[in-house]
Amino acid sequence: MRIKLDRTLCDGFGACAKHAPEYFSLDDWGYAALVGNGEIPEQDHDVVVRALLDCPVHAIIELGGHRPAAQPATIQDEAPEPHLNSDDSEAISDFVR
Amino acid sequence: MTTTTALTIAAWPGIEPRLLLPGEASEDYASYRKQGGYQPLDDVDRLLGEVDLSGLLGRGGAAFPLAVKVRAVRDNGHRRGGAIVVANGEEGEPASIKDRWLLRHRPHLVLDGLRLAARTVDASRAHVYVSDRQAADAVETALAEVDAAVLNGLAINVVEVEPSYVAGEETAAVRVLNGGPAKPTDKPPRPFEEGVSGLPTLVSNVETLANLPFLHRHGAEAFRQHGTSTSPGTFLATITGAGRPPALYEIPHGVAFTDLLTLHGVPADQVRGVLMGGYFAGLVNSDILDATLDHESLRSLNSGLGCGAIAILTDDCPVAVAASVMAYYDRENAGQCGSCFNGTAAMSAVTEALRDGLATDEDLARLERWSVVLRGRGACATLDGATNVAASLLVQFPQLIASHLENGCKTCHSGAFSAVRPYEVEAVMPA
């Protein structure tokens, strides 16, 4: 399964980090961030689903479940910045304007 | 009369400007056509090939290769039954003026770039997203002048929002165009996957788009006659600070920073450092004197060109500058992500205490830790900007930090630098 954490929704309840600490880290104020790229291997599904279901603000979202069959290509998946290596590009952030 | 009369506008000596025009007036349709604008586009793939070869990097701050973004939007759009293009002129960085200048003075150059971009991704709808009344008026006037045939059926509308730091982030633009507030959303999806009306959306900075007409007319080889191999072309640089009036220069990537100082009339031995990329890329100490103005050189200093705004610090204490910038981030963050609204407030408190000679070693250790662990914890990169400012201050100015811990900064004692919007080029004029 693939998940995302919507950090604009997280209210810092911390249930995710209790159930699946390998996938959710908390900051000094208890707000969560996802560890890794959101891909959850089979053996960890149960704890991550528990985290997802226990989040009081539904900030953890399973991806891919409700998409139409034709998935959009993603730059990350299909074209990892061809001809560009990160040493050559500023790429200081993803603050894309 | 515009409000930018105090702004010096100049191209780098010896180059033919591609983006700037002298004078105060807004270029009208007839003048733009006369100098070769709105050339017919018969071969979209050829233009896309030139964009590829040009290596044009986005001018909004992230320096993302335009060709990569265009191809992703085009391919996704073909799968999903359409694509949208957004010209992003919401210039959130207060120390930058270039996007507003382009929209106010060369609206047709931006619209020409926008209609070319729309063709490359097969979009039939486009938006010009701004937060400046003069810019909006100039674009509306330009749209009323333009011959519908040159737009090839492209529907363009202008959307104006209240200016704010985060409103120009690409997902904030998409959110506004979908009827929401001007605040970023978490990713995925990114706009190139799913944006305005759920369609793949090319959100591109107006300066980036303004390079397309040149590429269309002259090709990638001509484009690369200025700049370096990995930072090709020219860019617009907003220069502030150093007790000088602000300036907007068109600069070929790769020129020496010291040559910019000469052009701007600032003696190199007075330079304590710079604030780079607007506020986003943080501080650099006097090592900047050895830098060239391109992505590689600034990257080697752990900084970046960002949107091309450079504030030169001469008399201003970098600690006090960092404190003002951090306070700005504390106020201007979107208030959405807990790590960001807490983290910027905490880092702001320590930086201000440091400026005021009140910080302890423990405070400093916390600031150092936050500058590392908070990176990447926000839905947009505002928090990363704040961590860049904190981390660069600590790394670049260790002696100043030490003197502030002992409350020994003479500059700050005699009235510390303080600004609500440090190095702002002009006051915000709400819509």
Image: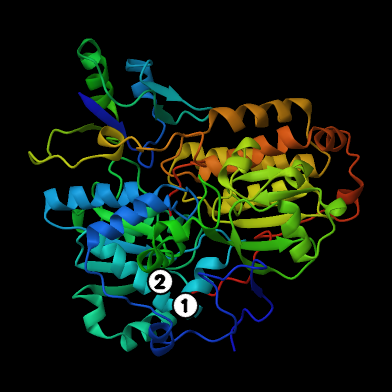
Relative vertical location of residue B30 with respect to residue B4 in this rendering, above or below: below
Q: Against B319, is B424 above or below?
A: below
Does dot 1 land on a helix, a strand or a loop? loop
Q: Residue furthest left?
A: A69
Residue B294, percent across and down? 59, 48
- Are discs 1 and 2 both within one chain? yes
Say which quarter of the image contains residue B87: bottom left
- Label 1 and label 2: CA atoms lie apart by 7 Å
Q: Is residue A19 visible?
A: yes
The chain holding disc 2 is B
Q: Is residue B178 visible?
A: no
Is B54 displayed left or right of B72 in the figure? right
Give the percent coordinates (x, y) of residue B155.
Answer: 22, 74
Q: Tags 1 and 2 in contact by the CB under 8 Å rule?
A: yes
Please report the residue visible at 27 percent of the width from the left and 43 percent of the height from the top.
Answer: B189
The residue that disc 1 covers is B106
Closer-to-camera residue (A67/A28): A67
How crowded pointer 2 is (Cα within 10 Å; few <14, some 14-19, many 20+) is rated as many
Query: Residue drawn at (70%, 26%), measured in percent from left and top?
Result: B365
Residue B198 in the image, given as x and y percentages of width and height = 19, 53
Quarter of the picture containing the N terminus of chain B is bottom right
Q: How many residues crowd mark 1 within 10 Å: few (<14), some (14–19), many (20+)?
A: many
Is A58 placed left or right of A26 in the picture? left
Mark 2 = which residue?
B110
In the foreground, B353 or B309: B309
Q: Can you tell which mark lies on residue B428?
A: none
- Residue type at the position of mark 2: Val
Pinpoint residue A12: horizontal percent, then vertical percent: 42, 32
Which residue is depicted at the point 56% across and 38% down? B343
